[in-house]
Image (cartoon, grey):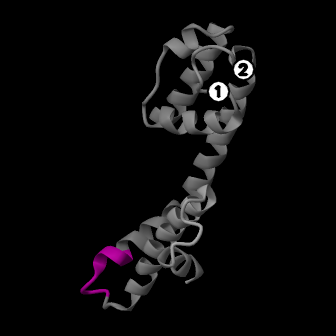
Amino acid sequence: AVISSVHLHRRYVSRPWFVVLLSLHHVLLWTKLHYFARVFSPSKNLLVDTIRIVLDDLKLFLVFLGLTMLGFAFAFFSLFREDRDTEYSDFTNFWHAVVSMLSYLLAMFDYNIFYNSTNPVSAMLLFIVFEGGYRS
């Protein structure tokens, strides 16, 4: 309610923190919409029940996936510590490494990052282990 009233009154709208808060607000509102959709009859609204059941089953998998991605992000961040001044910015800081792991998981990567690193063999082996673990 506070975020909505601040947005409607146009206070602090140009602040960078407000944009982040507003985007979080939208995600929470859509989540709450799914929460309130529970009151509908299950025979009429199977989508909400299906999403709830799938998310209940995926909780443990998503925790494992997140921890594995964090582990590989730390590994790549440590491996590329000497290459932070190059043109490739995938592992310049830890948050770039985490986002890179997510994009690698979705098969959006460039092999040149590994070939042009200080340790190309280690980088390719670590990448193969990461990709091989999720593709099998």
Q: Position of residue 60 (x, y in %)?
A: 59, 59
Residue occupying image coordinates x 58% and y 15%:
87
Q: For this view, does 33 lie left or right of residue 41?
A: right
> Looking at the rendered structure, which numbered label has been put on residue 48?
none
Amino acid type shown at disc 2 = Leu
Q: Position of residue 83 (x, y in %)?
A: 69, 15
Q: Is residue 65 above or below residue 51?
A: above
Tag nearer the camera, 2 or 1:
1
For the record, the magenta segment spans 42-49
Q: Are marks 2 and 1 in contact (CB under 8 Å)?
A: yes
Q: Position of residue 11 (x, y in %)?
A: 57, 72
Q: Kindly tell me whether residue 19 is visible in this rendering.
A: yes
> Looking at the rendered structure, which numbered label has been put on residue 79?
2
Circle 2 residues within 10 Å: few <14, some 14–19, many ≥20: some
State the quadrant of the N terminus: bottom right
| Count of numbered tags | 2
Q: Is residue 110 above or below residue 105?
A: above
Q: CA distance from mark 2 to mark 1?
A: 9 Å
Instruction: Determine which residue is flagged by label 1.
Output: 91
Q: Nearer the viewer, residue 111 or 62?
A: 111
- SS at mark 2? helix
Q: For this view, does 98 lie left or right of residue 111?
A: right
Answer whether residue 29 is magenta in the image: no
Circle 1 residues within 10 Å: few <14, some 14–19, many ≥20: many
Amino acid type shown at disc 1 = Phe
